[in-house]
Image (spheres, coloured by chain):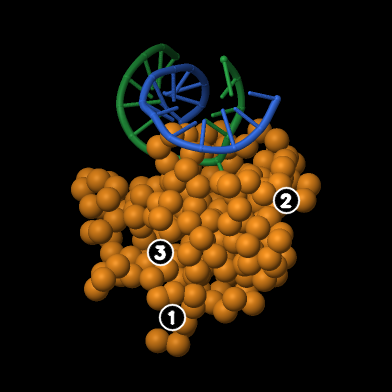
Chain colours: A orange, B blue, C green
Amino acid sequence: MDSLQPLPETFYLRPTLKVARDLLGTLFVRKIGNNIIAGRIVEVEAYHENGDESSHSYRGCTPRNEVMFRRGGLLYVYFTYGMHFCMNVVTEKEGTGAAVLIRAMEPIAGIELMQHRRGEFISRIDLTNGPAKCCQAFGIDKRQNGISLQGPGETICRGEKISDDRVLKSSRIGIRRSTELQWRFRIAGNPFISKPPGPVNRGL
DNA sequence: CAGTCGATGTACT
DNA sequence: GTACATCGACTGG
């Protein structure tokens, strides 16, 4: 299928906020042997070395975040809270520490594989509605840190185009600094977004 | 429904 | 020691 071509590297070599917004509606695809796991990205957050105290890259390059400083189009996976992984899409040119966190997806293919990893009795709505849940459902861990998204194993493909009136911008989740930055993007009314504490997501 | 809290590796003060 | 781009179990109303 033509739409299942990986997004070109030039897609990622753009301003991070634009990449974040345009990732909404695209398909994250992982092929493991003959099996395919896929999800539609419905919620993301942008992180940048400039003016963003909450970004891992804010204080410069370290062993953990060095992938953020590589060229756009790679996967940045980090370990947090002693038990969870989160995945990001690296953006912009080599030397710029920026990335987009994938916070939630809508399961499209490989539901049974996701349930095998997440739990046999987890409902479809709860498989990938959080950044660490996405990694667990897709089997993403530190072994995928730094891999290319041009495939063949892991790719992001064009999906449904999301018009501006269906994109919600808001503050990011789970951070204590730079709360004024409206760098969280989600598809309005989509039921597969994460459900953090605080004001409930009512689609707006 | 909301709020609290434990798990537990890594980075940073 | 403390904080952390989280999750899920548990508590009380």
Residue A175 lies left or right of residue A152; in this view the side is right
Q: Which mark is residue A49?
A: 2
Residue toward you, A186 or A111: A111
Above or below, A52 relative to A32: above
Label 1 – label 3 distance at C-alpha:
13 Å
- Which amino acid type is marked by label 1? Leu
Give x and y (percent) for residue A113: 25, 59
- Which amino acid type is marked by label 2? Glu
Chain letter for mark 1: A
Mark earlier in primary sequence (3, 2):
3
Chain letter for mark 3: A
Marks 1 and 2: in contact by CB < 8 Å? no
Mark earlier in primary sequence (1, 3):
1
Residue extending farthest to the front is A63
Q: Are marks 3 and 2 on the same chain?
A: yes
- Which amino acid type is marked by label 3? Gly
Label 3 – label 2 distance at C-alpha:
28 Å
Q: What secondary structure is marked by label 2?
A: loop
Q: Nearer the viewer, mark 3 or mark 2?
A: 2
Residue A180 lies left or right of residue A55; in this view the side is right
Q: What secondary structure is marked by label 3?
A: strand
What residue would you read off at disc 1? A4
Mark earlier in primary sequence (2, 1):
1
Give x and y (percent) for residue A59: 72, 42
Residue under the image location 43 percent in, 80 percent down? A4
Q: Would residue A70 be seen by someone viewing this image from the given angle?
A: yes
Chain letter for mark 2: A
What residue would you read off at disc 3? A39
Q: Nearer the viewer, mark 2 or mark 1?
A: 2
Q: What secondary structure is marked by label 1?
A: helix
Residue toward you, A68 or A164: A68
